[in-house]
Image (cartoon, grey):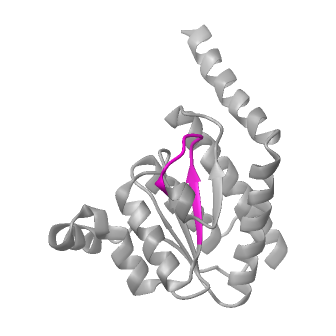
Amino acid sequence: MKSRITNCIQESIKVKQNILSDENLLKNIETIVSKSVDAFKEDKKMLLCGNGGSASDAQHIAAELSGRFYKDRKPLFAEALHVNSSFVTAVANDYGYDNIYSRMVEAAGRNGDICIGISTSGNSTNVVNAIIKAKEIGMVTIGFTGEKTGKMDELCDIMIKIPSSDTPRIQESHILVGHIICQFIEEELF
C-alpha cells in the first residue's frame, strides 16, 4: 500500500513539474490574472461552472474570491453556477441538463464579465454550451481542461490545459492553478 501511495504522490508531482516547464500555460495563468483584475476593477463578475469534482473546483475558486484568500478585504463577485439547486433542477427538467449553465450565463452574464468552464475532457456539453453563450454575450471565456483536445479548445479565449490525461491529477492541478489565480488577483487588487 505504501508504494502505491508514494506512486500517486509522485505522479501528482510529475504533472506539476510538467506545468512548470510549459511556458504557454504559465503565460495563460498570467493572462487570466490580468483579465480578471481588469474585470473586477470595472465592477464585473466571474461565473464558473463544471460537473462533479470540477463543480467543486468552480465553487472553491468562487469562494476564495467572494470570501477571502489571504487578506481581509472587500468581496469580489464570483459565483459557481450550480449552487442554486432549485434553478439547476428546474432548468434540467424544463430545458435539459445540457442547458443548466448556459441559461444562467444568459441571465447573469454581461459583456466584459469572466466565464470559467472546468471540464477535464473539455467536452462536457453543459460547460461547452455555457462557453458558447458567454462568447455571444461578450464575456471573456476561460477553459480548464486536461491535455487532450476537446470542444472547449476552439471556443475559449484562454485555455489552461493540464499536461495529463488522468482525471484526479488534472483536478489536483486545476485547484492549484485556481489558487494561484486567486492569490494574484487578490494581491493586484488589494
The quadrant of the picture occupied by the C terminus is bottom right
Q: Nearer the viewer, residue 12 or 74?
A: 12
Using the image, determine if residue 115 lies above or below residue 144: below
Q: What residue is shown at x 56% (from left), y 55% (from top)? A: 153
What segment carries the magenta color? Answer: 141-151
Quadrant housing residue 170: top right
Residue at the far bottom: name it.
Answer: 42
Image coordinates of residue 32 in percent, x first then y, are 71, 66
Image position of 104 (left or right of 5)? left
As for residue 143 lying within the magenta part, the answer is yes
Quadrant housing residue 188: bottom right
Image position of 89 (left or right of 40)? left
Image coordinates of residue 56 in percent, x first then y, are 47, 54
Q: What residue is shown at x 81% (from left), y 40% (from top)? A: 20
Residue 190 shows in this picture: no
Image coordinates of residue 109 in percent, x first then y, are 48, 83
Using the image, determine if residue 1 lies above or below residue 32: above
Q: What residue is shown at x 65% (from left), y 38% (from top)? A: 163
